[in-house]
Image (cartoon, rainbow, N blue to C red):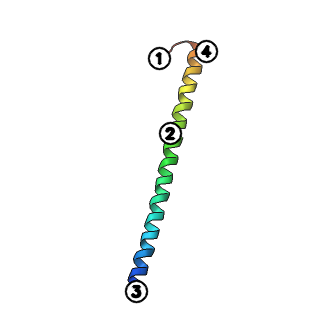
Amino acid sequence: MNHKLINAAAFCVVLSTVYLAAKEVWFFVEYRQAQAQLREEKLRAAMRDVLGDIK
């Protein structure tokens, strides 16, 4: 078999794996940011309930 073809196929496999891993990391970071924002909103709501409306 042609070695250049094998190298090109291996490169494509590695590239797609790196792309999928980066995509998973991006989704995880977005998820963590959304969770942090939700926690902050819940904390503000709880503080507002206890202390009243503070700016």
Residue 11 in the image: above or below residue 31: below
Whole-angstrom CA distance, mark 1 to mark 3, is: 69 Å
Q: Residue at x 50, y 53 (%)?
A: 24
What is the number of the mark on residue 55?
1
Helix, strand or loop under label 4:
helix
The residues bearing labels 3 and 2 have C-alpha atoms spaced at a distance of 47 Å
Bin the neighbour count of mark 1 within 10 Å (Cα to Cα): few under 14, some 14-19, many 20 and up.
few
Q: Which residue is mark 4?
A: 50
Instruction: Tell me, yes or no, whether the two marked residues, 3 and 2, touch with CB atoms within 8 Å.
Output: no
Q: Mark 2 is on which residue type? A: Gln
Task: Tell which of 37 and 10 is nearer to you.
Answer: 10
Going 51% across and 37% down the picture, which residue do you hit? 34
Sequence-first disc among 3 and 2: 3
User: Mark 3 against mark 4, which lies toward the viewer?
Assistant: 3
- Comparing 50 with 15, the one in front is 15
Looking at the image, is mark 1 or mark 4 earlier in the sequence?
4
Helix, strand or loop under label 3 = loop
* Circle 1: residue type: Lys
Residue at far top of view? 52
Mark toward the start of the polypeptide (2 vs 4): 2
Q: Residue 46 sits in which quadrant?
A: top right
Residue tagged 2? 33
Cα separation, mark 2 vs mark 1, equals 23 Å
In the image: residue 6, left or right of residue 53: left
User: What residue is shown with label 3?
Assistant: 2
Amino acid on which disc 4 is placed: Val
Under circle 1, the secondary element is loop
